[in-house]
Amino acid sequence: MKNNIRVARAIKNITQAGLAGLIGVSRQTINTIESNRYVPSTVLALKIARVFGKPVEEIFILEEED
C-alpha cells in the first residue's frame, strides 16, 4: 500500500510532529507510515484522512500486490 501523506502534509504545511499531535501518535509512527514500513489501522487511517479533509482512498492507495 502506498500513501500520499508527505504530499498532503506539504500542501497543508504540517510537520510530521504536527500531524502526530493532531491524531495522537508519535512522530516516529507518522514517519514509518510515510516510509511504507507500517500499515496503519483503519481508525488511524481515518484520522489521518480527516485531518486533510480527504477520503481515505485519496491518502492511501492499494497496489496490485496488496
Image: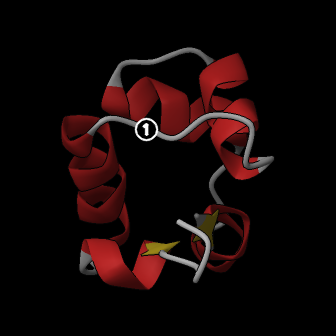
Secondary structure beneath label 1? loop
- Which residue reaches farthest front? 65
| Left or right of residue 39, residue 45 in this image | left
- Looking at the picture, how far across and down is residue 58, in whole percent? 41, 85
State the residue at coordinates (22%, 53%): 46
Please name the residue that numbered disc 1 is placed on: 40
| Left or right of residue 30, residue 58 in this image | left
| Left or right of residue 16, residue 8 in this image | left
| Left or right of residue 57, residue 10 in this image | right
Camera-side residue: 60 or 8? 60
**Residue kind at label 1, given as amino acid type:** Pro
Location of residue 29 (image quadrant): top right
State the residue at coordinates (58%, 64%): 1
Relative vertical location of residue 12 with respect to residue 38 in this rendering, above or below: below
- Looking at the picture, how far across and down is residue 27, in whole percent? 66, 22
State the residue at coordinates (71%, 50%): 34
- Which residue reaches farthest right? 35
State the residue at coordinates (70%, 76%): 7
Relative vertical location of residue 45 with respect to residue 29 in this rendering, above or below: below
